[in-house]
Image (tube, rainbow, N blue to C red):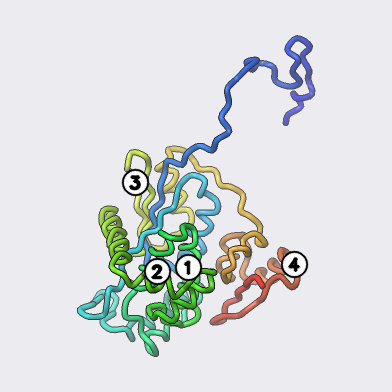
């Protein structure tokens, strides 16, 4: 409040600014979000994993402007007939080196040896599990996608296998066996095909792709893992004005999401230098409420 609030007018009976109408109608309902952010992705997309720190910050700071809709893109139907000659990928073993390169560049931990030891045959099974959870337990699908990515990239687990998927879904407090069984039905594939149709309509050809669309169905597409400023500029173009960021919740609040939080994510989210991350965590979190791990030479923290 300004100092004007200390000025009281005997005529109007108002302390402060007294040029308002005596009676007014107000609406405290939140303004409906008229912008949609489509996130075209896949559970085994390495560049999507690399984008996590930036995308999380973008949603944390600017999510009050838009609704997020995550669409599965179908990166790998099967290895039969698959060929990505441009990237030198013809067989599962060819992916390992590519993944490690992405991990080293982004500092989001990626092992990659799953492609040598127990190759994923298709990204459709985890994608269908995502769709089933989205339908039955809306809001939980993002938590599943996150822990599935932690499992495949950092923990070297084959998220195309039913046993692994059941275990991951169980970790969310859901019935893994039941959900994975549902994900094997044609109805789950039909839901996945709907996502494929939508990503095709959005002109998606690579992952990650972020498409920000306004009420008039005009949008801007950003392809690949880009800097935060790129997404802010895209949002500004759609809004027609400079978007105002919200204050990011503290680390203790972020930890309530329950998944691992890697050093790179903390650095990007809170503007902390790499060598200051451990001391930042110690200053933000109560002793005994978190566990520190080192995964593929990267610092990580998780709620106990």
Query: Which residue is painted at 41% across and 51% down in the image?
Result: 37
Mark 2 Cα shell of 10 Å, populated few (<14), some (14-19), many (≥20): many
> What is the number of the mark on residue 144?
1
Q: How many marks?
A: 4
- Badge 2 vs badge 3, beta-carbon distance below 8 Å: no
Asked which quadrant contains residue 161, the reply is bottom left
> What is the number of the mark on residue 35?
none
Mark 3 Cα shell of 10 Å, populated few (<14), some (14-19), many (≥20): some
Q: Earlier in the sequence, mark 1 or mark 2?
A: 2
Q: Which residue is mark 2?
A: 129
Between the C-alphas of marks 4 and 2, the distance is 35 Å
Q: Which residue is mark 4?
A: 286
Name the secondary structure under disc 3: strand
Between the C-alphas of marks 1 and 2, the distance is 9 Å
Between the C-alphas of marks 2 and 3, the distance is 29 Å
Between the C-alphas of marks 3 and 4, the distance is 43 Å
Name the secondary structure under disc 4: loop
Q: In the image shown, does 273 or 189 lie closer to the viewer? A: 189
Q: Which residue is mark 3?
A: 219
Q: Earlier in the sequence, mark 4 or mark 2?
A: 2
In the image, farthest residue toward the left:
81
Left or right of 68, for residue 26? right
Q: In the image shown, does 268 or 275 lie closer to the viewer? A: 268
The answer to whether residue 206 of the structure is visible from this angle is no
Mark 1 Cα shell of 10 Å, populated few (<14), some (14-19), many (≥20): many
């Amino acid at each position: 409040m300004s100092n004007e609030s200390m000025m009281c007018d005997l005529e109007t009976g108002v302390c402060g600014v007294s040029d308002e109408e005596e009676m007014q109608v107000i609406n405290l309902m939140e303004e409906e979000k008229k912008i949609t952010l489509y996130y075209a992705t896949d559970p085994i997309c390495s560049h999507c994993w690399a984008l996590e720190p930036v995308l999380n910050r973008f949603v944390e700071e600017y999510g009050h402007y838009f609704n997020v809709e995550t669409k599965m893109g179908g990166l790998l139907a099967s290895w039969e007939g698959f060929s990505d000659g441009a990237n030198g990928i013809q067989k599962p073993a060819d992916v390992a080196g590519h993944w490690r390169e992405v991990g080293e560049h982004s500092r989001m931990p990626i092992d990659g040896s799953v492609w040598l030891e127990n190759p994923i045959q298709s990204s459709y099974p985890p994608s269908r599990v995502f769709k089933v959870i989205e339908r039955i337990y809306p809001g939980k699908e993002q938590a599943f996608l996150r822990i599935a990515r932690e499992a495949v990239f950092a923990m070297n687990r084959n998220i195309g296998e039913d046993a692994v998927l059941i275990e991951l879904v169980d970790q969310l407090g859901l019935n893994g066996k039941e959900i994975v069984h549902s994900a094997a039905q044609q109805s789950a594939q039909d839901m996945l095909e709907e996502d494929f149709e939508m990503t095709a309509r959005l002109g998606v050809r690579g992952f990650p792709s972020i498409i920000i669309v306004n009420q008039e169905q005009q949008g801007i597409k950003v392809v690949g893992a880009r800097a935060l400023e790129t997404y802010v500029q895209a949002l500004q173009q759609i809004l027609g004005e400079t978007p105002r960021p919200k204050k990011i919740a503290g680390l203790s609040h972020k930890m309530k999401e329950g998944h691992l939080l890697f050093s790179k994510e903390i650095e990007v989210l809170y503007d902390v230098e790499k060598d200051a991350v451990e001391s930042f965590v110690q200053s933000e979190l109560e002793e005994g409420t978190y566990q520190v791990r080192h995964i593929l030479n990267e610092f990580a923290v998780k709620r106990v």
